[in-house]
Image: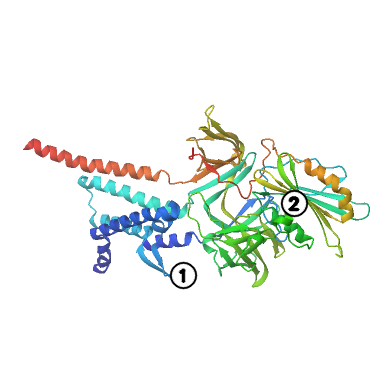
Amino acid sequence: MTSELSRWFKPLTSLKLTICCLACAMVLVFIGTLDQVHIGVYEAENRYFKSLFLFFTLPGTQFRIPWFPGGYIVGTLLLTNLIAAHVARFKLSWKKAGILLLHSGLILLLVGQLFADIFIDLESQMRLDQGQTKNYSESLYHDELAIIDTSGADADQVISLPESRLYRGSRIELPVDSLEVVIQEYYPNAALVSPTQLPSPSYPHLPIGPMAVAVQMEKTYKENERNQPAATVSILQNGNPIGSWSVAAGFPRPLSFQAAGKNFQIVLRPKRFYKPFAIQLLQFRHDRYAGTDIAKNFSSRIKLTDPAKHEDRESLIFMNNPLRYRGYTFFQAGFDNDDTTTILQVAQNPSWLVPYISCALIVLGMLLQFGMHLFSFVKRRVIA
Amino acid sequence: MLAVALALVSCNNDKVEVYRIPKEGIKVAMQNGPEGLTPARGNPAHWTKPGGWKEQPLSEMRLGSFKVDGSSAASADVSVIAFPGEAGGLISNINRWRGQLQLAPLNEDQLAQTTQRTEVDNVPTYLVDFQTAENDPKPSRILGAVLQAANRTWFVKMTGPPDLIESQRQTFLEFVKSFRFTSPPGTESSAPAVSTKPKSTNDE
């Protein structure tokens, strides 16, 4: 290794860096756990662990100052440190086998989790009324502004704009027909009220319809509530305005417009994840113990249809008996509407085996390492 | 590697996605249409259509829609709409109807005097009858009923020329009285826009 490279490489292998990263991780876990009381598990996870930095917003401004590394930086540094240390001090010997196994398990765990975080939208929900069929699930936390080209004879083209791009003044070029979306106004959380309930006609609001206007609300972090954004959106074609519309996630019915001789719809709704198959709810059952209101069993009898795989069958989903199909797992999660609507949790995690393999490697490594120590210790005592 | 990981993290959430899906046939709401909120469809009522009323195509908002032809070219329009909860309250909805006839809004006392209270299928029901001012160049009249069912408010409204409405008054009242709010199981359609919080199977 050249001296220049080793000058850069050496600090990465340092044990001080490991200690520093572990200390930062402890601080993150500590303040993240405390803050979770105020902002909920999901937001705490995003703010402290699935982030590059923790930010401090200067009061009265939008100016955000990073003041502490977030989970992604700490995790990646720790991973780099671990790999670099092994590369620098690698020696193939039986004595080191335990440590090698243990650390490779740790590396697998960190890499697997990082990839799962980045590439997989882990969980969504499918809400089905009795008799209803759906081929998509919806995000629990995120919304999308969907612009749908409905001109096709047998298929619609959906352009989904993520929540992170929706803020006042945002301009988003669409990859079709030289269209551009301009977000004129955006409320991250809004309530729909009757126009007569406004404190005054000039109170800031977005007109969703003659019977409803959207007014801005504080963002909610409560476990059982969901933010329902509202926005006023303008569509431009080649820089020329086509029209402006106000949309609200609390009123997720598409509005229609025409551009480039095509029919489009625009809707603000929970982010959808389409599947190559459809699920119909045949019956939801909420059984109770006789003479009481205590739940005995929740179950959903569903029909799964997948023309591509020639699949057309019924299945019963109940507690601890999810439906697993094409990499998705459907769990019984909830119900609504006097037991006529079922809510299925949809999990997709191709790397679900990784934590198990990692833990097995770590355990095996520890057994080997400590076993060898014990063995040599006992041997020394016998000799003595 | 650090740079790659950071780049992946930072760009993944900002992607504009484009994909194709089979046709869904979603109904489209017009923003400038007659109503604005999603109608509640979870608990449809049942009614008996009077003879002589012609069914009209249902829209996104209307759960029932009828046309009543008069003797001349005149016709009246009947709509049935339902919203979750109190749908903004009785007075604001009745004043909304008055606004459609260019009439001044009523206060609570005046409302009590102009509204006839009755019950349909054990559901509190308020009947109103409003007509445009005498000198209005386009005379029009509204017969309305607001039925406050358990978790939905139903609005039944007949609009048209005053003479025609007068001749249909009794038929309209019979139509309102024919409402029944028990829904046979398995007939639910799409979810209501505002519902009570879904229950988790962990709750119990």
The residue to which callout 1 is attached is: A62
The type of residue carrying mark 1 is Gln
Label 2 neighbour load within 10 Å: few <14, some 14-19, many 20+: some
Residue at the spot x=33%, y=54% of the render?
A30
Image position of A214 (left or right of B8): right
Which residue of the protein is positioned furthest toward the top in this rendering? Answer: A290
Subunit ID for the residue under disc 1: A
Residue A81 in view here: no
Which residue of the protein is positioned furthest toward the bottom in this rendering? Answer: A239
As drawn, A348 above or below B9: above
The type of residue carrying mark 2 is Ser
Residue at the spot x=75%, y=61% of the render?
B99
Indicate the position of residue A155 as horizontal and vertical percent values.
66, 52
> Which quadrant: the N terminus of chain B?
bottom left
Image position of B116 (left or right of B170): left
Image position of B2 (left or right of A213): left
Residue A262: numbered disc: none
Alpha-carbon span between mark 1 and mark 2: 44 Å
Indicate the position of residue A186 as horizontal and vertical percent values.
57, 64
- Asked where in the image residue A185 lies, by quadrant, the reply is bottom right
In the image, A336 versus B107, the foreground residue is B107
In the image, B32 versus B136, the foreground residue is B136
Which residue of the protein is positioned furthest toward the right in this rendering? Answer: B72
Subunit ID for the residue under disc 2: B
The residue to which callout 2 is attached is: B59
